[in-house]
Structure formats: C-alpha cells, structure tokens
Image (cartoon, grey):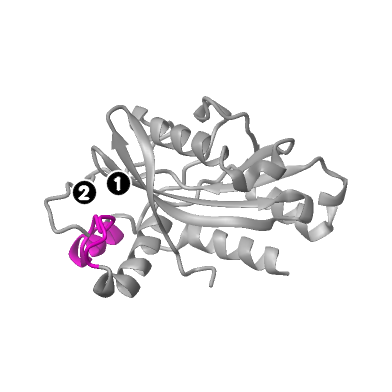
Amino acid sequence: MKNLITALLLIFLFSCSGQKNNNTINPKANSAQSNLTETESNIVNEFLGSELKKDRYKNYKDYEVFLIEEAVKKTKSIYAYEYTYKNFYKREREREYWILDSVQIKRLKSDLETEKQYYWKISDFKNTKVSLYKYQELRTIIKTGAYVNLPKRLIIFLSKPLIINESTALISFDIGNGTLGNNEITHFTVLMKKNEKKWIAKDYFEDGAFQ
C-alpha cells in the first residue's frame, strides 16, 4: 500500500502546476524539448553514474536498472528546495546551498506552471545501462503482483535538471527495489555544481511530499 501511495504521489507531482547574489535564473526553464541539451545530458549522466556507485546500492549490483519513461517534472525540484528553505533557512543562514531566495523561488514556480512533459529515451543515458517502464506499466505490475515473477530491478523516477545558471542545477531522484513492487530505497532533490568540466552532487534537500 505504501508503495502504491508513493507512486500516486509521484504522478500527482508530474502534473502539479538562497544565496543573495545575482543568480541568473534560466529563462528557458519551461521550454519544450524532444532531446536533452548538452548541459542537461552532462548533469543527468554524471549524477546517475556517481549516485549508483554509492555503498547504499552494493546489495543491488546484479539488479537491472529501469527508469520511468515520464520524467518527473522540474517543478518537483523547486518545491523540494522551497520546502527546505521555508523550514531551515532561518536557523541555517550560513549554509552555502541557499542558491535562491523567496522572490526567485516564486518566479521559477510561475515559469514552470505550464511545464511540458519530457519522456526519457535510452539514448539519454551514456554510461548507465537502463531500460524504460511507462508509469502505467509500473502501476499495473504493482497492482497485479506481477513483480514476483520479474527479474531483480531497481526502479528510478528522475527529473530533468532545473538549471539555475551555468554552474548550478537541481535534479530530483527517487529509487526503489522492484522485487518488492517498488519498495523505496531513497529519494531526494540534489544540488549539482559544476566543478571545472564535471557536475558534482553538493547538497541534498528534503522534499516534504513523502512525509
């Protein structure tokens, strides 16, 4: 039941409408694209490749990796950041991860109100072998219990990067153990920073939606 509720919350998020410096908010945050830009591709691949090498996944090394074809909307990332900002900024003002203030948050939320759905493609992933599930396909697998007869799988919900400026982006991630339907392993929104030519995960934000 918990797995199904989590999945339903995610599909709702698909459709739901910092530092006080001069961050340049991406003016094309809501643009519809059929392919990732080079920057988006670099962020996605460097994040996923690094994340899946962490110790928390050492027991899943022989699992296949499946992504939900319908990308989590970038709206999720800004809501996760806003949740942390509202709850922790006053007592953690010195933290370096405050990349947006309340005015910038509001502007981005407005920009993303009519955000278009992006659909992942196998070709989007350069260094990680993945397969794709449509969201409805995963719901059917969970509802019917068909997962008990399927190979070991990790199930990932992933957003397109929300690019704040040329060296800063947010990306949302949810991963579950598919052998149990979709039993959650972890979920978060991560602040990605460009360090020379590579994008590095720097800080993590609670999203509130799953609590």
Q: Quadrant of residue 19?
A: bottom left
**Nearer-the-camera pick, 14 or 187:** 187
Q: Could you tell me which secondary element the residue under label 2 belongs to?
A: loop
**Distance from Cα at disc 2 to Cα at disc 1:** 8 Å
**Nearer-the-camera pick, 138 or 63:** 63
Q: Position of residue 109 (x, y in %)?
A: 30, 61
Q: Residue at x 53, y 63 (%)?
A: 12
Please rate how many residues cluster around mark 2, counting C-alpha atoms within 10 Å: few if below 14, some from 14 to 19, many from 20: some
| Tag 2 residue | 25
Q: In the image, is residue 11 above or below residue 69?
A: below
Is residue 102 located in the magenta-colored stretch of the structure?
yes
- Residue 36 visible in image: no
Q: Residue at x 63, y 60 (%)?
A: 7
In this picture, which residue range is highlighted in magenta? 93-110
| Tag 1 residue | 29
Residue 56 is labelled as none
Q: Position of residue 162 (x, y in %)?
A: 35, 47
- Asked whether the residues under the numbered discs 2 and 1 touch, taking CB atoms below 8 Å apart as contact, a structural biologist would say yes
Q: Position of residue 85 (x, y in %)?
A: 30, 67
Q: Could you tell me which secondary element the residue under label 1 belongs to?
A: loop
Question: Seen in the image, is 168 located left or right of residue 183?
Answer: left
**Amino acid under disc 2:** Ile
Q: Residue at x 64, y 50 (%)?
A: 135
**Amino acid under disc 1:** Ala
